[in-house]
């Protein structure tokens, strides 16, 4: 078993304020999608406040939502993102969010039990944007195996892409 877990940050720049009529469907689906994540195989933890969400946390600006979570591995997160009802919400993202011309998601390995905060996550996103994918900050397309993965079991970066 690995001594590392996969952390992820994804951001979304809202077209309108969260309490606007345009965001009603997005907000109405938050609890359902968060519960889906928490019940997914390989889910470990997600950043949330006492109300169960992270929409009030805005380290990257008032109009940017952040989602930070920790998963067992890349495959578990990829299955949730691309093979669950989460896909239905992703298909609608342009209704609620502006396109971002830089990376809006970053993955990185953390020691088991470590829970990244929004500042660590923002640093990882900045690293990915500045230097491109590396073992320290990467994407699904250029995923890196956990630092303690056996070399014979560690696929090359493109072999883990969705």
Image (cartoon, rainbow, N blue to C red):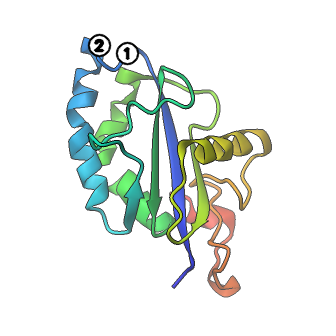
Which of these two is toward me, 74 or 65? 65
Picture coordinates of residue 67, whole percent (x, y): 44, 42
Helix, strand or loop at label 1? It is loop
- Left or right of residue 99: residue 139: right
Q: Is residue 113 above or below residue 131?
A: below
Residue 156: image quadrant is: bottom right
Which of these two is toward me, 52 or 79? 52
Picture coordinates of residue 28, whole percent (x, y): 20, 31
The residue under the point 38% across, 68% down is 42
For mark 1, what is the residue?
17
Helix, strand or loop at label 2? It is loop
Picture coordinates of residue 8, whole percent (x, y): 52, 52
Q: Is residue 70 above or below residue 90?
A: below
Q: Is residue 29 above or below residue 36?
A: above
Residue 85 in view, yes or no? no
Report if the CB atoms under discs 2 and 1 are less than 8 Å apart. Answer: yes
Query: Could you classify mark 1 by the number of other residues whose Cα lies within 10 Å: few (under 14), some (14-19), or many (20 or more)?
Result: some
- Left or right of residue 82: residue 145: right
The residue under the point 24% across, 13% down is 21
Q: Is residue 157 above or below residue 65?
A: below
- Left or right of residue 60: residue 27: left
Picture coordinates of residue 97, whole percent (x, y): 43, 24
The residue under the point 22% across, 42% down is 31
**What's the CA distance linking mark 2 and mark 1?**
5 Å
For mark 2, what is the residue?
20
Q: Which mark is residue 119?
A: none
The residue under the point 65% across, 32% down is 102
Residue 32 in view, yes or no? yes
- Left or right of residue 96: residue 21: left
């Amino acid at each position: 078993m690995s001594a590392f877990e996969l952390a992820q940050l994804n951001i979304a720049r809202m077209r309108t304020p969260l309490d606007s009529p345009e965001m009603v469907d997005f907000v109405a689906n938050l609890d359902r999608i968060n519960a889906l994540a928490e019940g997914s195989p390989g889910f470990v933890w997600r950043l949330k406040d006492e109300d169960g969400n992270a929409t009030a946390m805005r380290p990257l600006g008032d109009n940017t939502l952040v989602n930070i979570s920790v998963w067992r591995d890349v495959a578990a997160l990829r299955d949730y993102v691309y093979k669950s009802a989460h896909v239905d919400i992703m298909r609608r993202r342009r209704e609620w969010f502006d396109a971002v011309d830089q990376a809006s998601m970053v993955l990185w390995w953390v020691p088991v039990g470590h829970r990244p905060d929004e500042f660590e996550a923002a640093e990882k996103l900045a690293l990915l944007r500045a230097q491109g994918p590396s073992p320290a900050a990467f994407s699904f397309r250029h995923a890196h195996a956990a630092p303690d993965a056996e070399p014979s079991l560690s696929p090359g970066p493109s072999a883990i892409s969705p």
